[in-house]
Amino acid sequence: MTVSLPMSARKIALVFAALCMVQFALAQTRSAPGGGMAIAPSAPLGDTPTLSVVEWLQRMHSASRQRSYVGTFVVSAATGDLSSARIWHVCEGDLQMERVEALSGPPRSTFRRNDRVMTFLPDAKVVKSEKRDSLELFPNLLGTPDSALNDFYSVRVLGKGRVAGFDADVVNLVPRDMLRFGYRIWSERRSGLVVKLQTLDGEGRVVEQSAFSELQLDAPVKVQALSQMMADTTGYRIEKSELDRTTPQAEGWTLKNPVDGFKPASCYRRTLGGAGSGEHAMQWTFTDGLATVSLFVEPYDAQRQPKEVLLALGATHTMTRRLVDPSGDWWLTAVGEVPPQTLEAFALRLARTR
C-alpha cells in the first residue's frame, strides 16, 4: 500500500529549484480535457521551435541559469495538497543565488549560493547547512545532455499557452517505458524558462503540478543583499551535514545490473547521529537526465527502522527495505521522482560485495 503524505516546505523548495521560462502569444485558446489546461490548437504552430528532446532540455536548462526573477511559486499534488513559496533568483556570470520563503506550513527560509545551501528554521532557531553537487534545476542535466535521452523520452509539441501572464510553448516529454514519469512543460517563449510543469503517470494523469502564479522576469535582485541575509545566522545554531565523497565499491555495494537509462551521478558517505557518532550511511544518486533516484544505505537497527513502507508525496516516492546479509543486515531508503516500480528495480539489483 502506498501512503500519501502532505506537501512540505522542503518539497516546494526542491520542486521550485526544478523549474526553469519564453516569445509571442496566440489569441485563441481552448480548454483541454482532463485538467482545464488552456492550450492553443497545435496545427498553426508558426514559430514554435522544432527541437529534439535534448535540444528542448538544453534550452530550458540554459534559461534556468541565465535569468533573474522574483515570483510566487505553487506546488499541488493529485491528493489535493497545496504549498506555495516566494522566490528570489539572481544570476551574475557563473554565480547562482536563490532565496525561497515558504508561504505555507512552518516558517522556513532556504538560501542557495551555487552548491552551498542553508535552510533557516525560525521556530527551532536552527540553520541547516549543506553542500549539493546537483542543484536540482529542471531539467536535471549533468553537463552536456546525453543523446541517450532520446532513447527513453519522445517529445510532442502541444501548442501554445499562457502562465502568469507569459506566453509559452507547451510540450510533452513522453516516456518510452514504465520506469519514468512523463512531463507536460510550459516553456516561456522568449527565454525557454519553465514556468509550469506537470508530472504525468502512465495513464497520463497529473500526479503533481508546479507553476508560477505571479512572475517578474529580469527583476532587480541583488546578489549582495541575498548574501548578507544568508550570512546572518545571529541567534541560530548551525547544523552542518557531514558529507564525504566516496564510491560504491569503497562502501561495498554494487548494482547487479543497471536500471535502464539511469546513470550514477554521485556517491557520498553521510554521518549519522552527529559528528563523532561513528555511524555512517551511503548516499548513491542516479539520474536519467530528468528524474533522479537516491539510495541511502545504513546498518539495520530494529529500534529505528521497525517496518518497510512505501510513501508518496506528489511525484516523489520513498521506499524502505531491509536487506538481509550474512555479515549483518542493512536498511535501504530509496527516494525518487519516479514510479514505485523503478525504486523496486533498484532495490532488487542492489547487492553487497563484501
Image: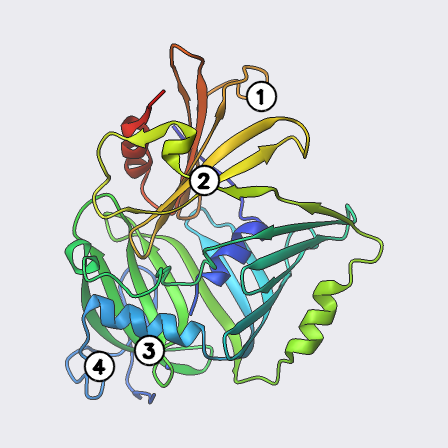
Mark nearer the N terminus (3 vs 1): 3
The percent position of residue 176, horizontal first and vertical second, equals 16, 52
| Residue marked by disc 4 | 49
Front position in the image: 84 or 306? 306
| Residue marked by disc 2 | 246
Position of the N terminus, as image quadrant, is top left
Disc 4 marks a residue whose amino acid type is Pro
Graded by Cα atoms within 10 Å as few (under 14), some (14 to 19) or many (20 or more), the crowding at tag 4 reads: few
- Which of labels 3 and 1 is toward the front? 1
SS type, badge 4: loop
| Residue marked by disc 1 | 304
Image: 23 above or below 55: below
The quarter of the picture where residue 253 lies is top left
CB within 8 Å, label 4 to label 3: no
| Residue marked by disc 3 | 161
The residue under the point 34% across, 55% down is 199
Does residue 98 show up?
yes
- Which of labels 2 and 1 is toward the front? 2
- Which of labels 4 and 2 is toward the front? 2
Front position in the image: 63 or 317? 63
State the mark number for residue 199.
Answer: none
The residue under the point 36% across, 60% down is 142
Q: CA distance from mark 1 to mark 4?
A: 52 Å
Q: CA distance from mark 3 to mark 1?
A: 48 Å
* Left/right of residue 334 with respect to residue 218 in the rendered view: left
Disc 2 marks a residue whose amino acid type is Thr
Disc 1 marks a residue whose amino acid type is Arg
Front position in the image: 47 or 130? 130
Mark nearer the N terminus (4 vs 2): 4
Graded by Cα atoms within 10 Å as few (under 14), some (14 to 19) or many (20 or more), the crowding at tag 2 reads: some
Does residue 309 show up?
no
* Left/right of residue 141 with respect to residue 112 in the rendered view: left
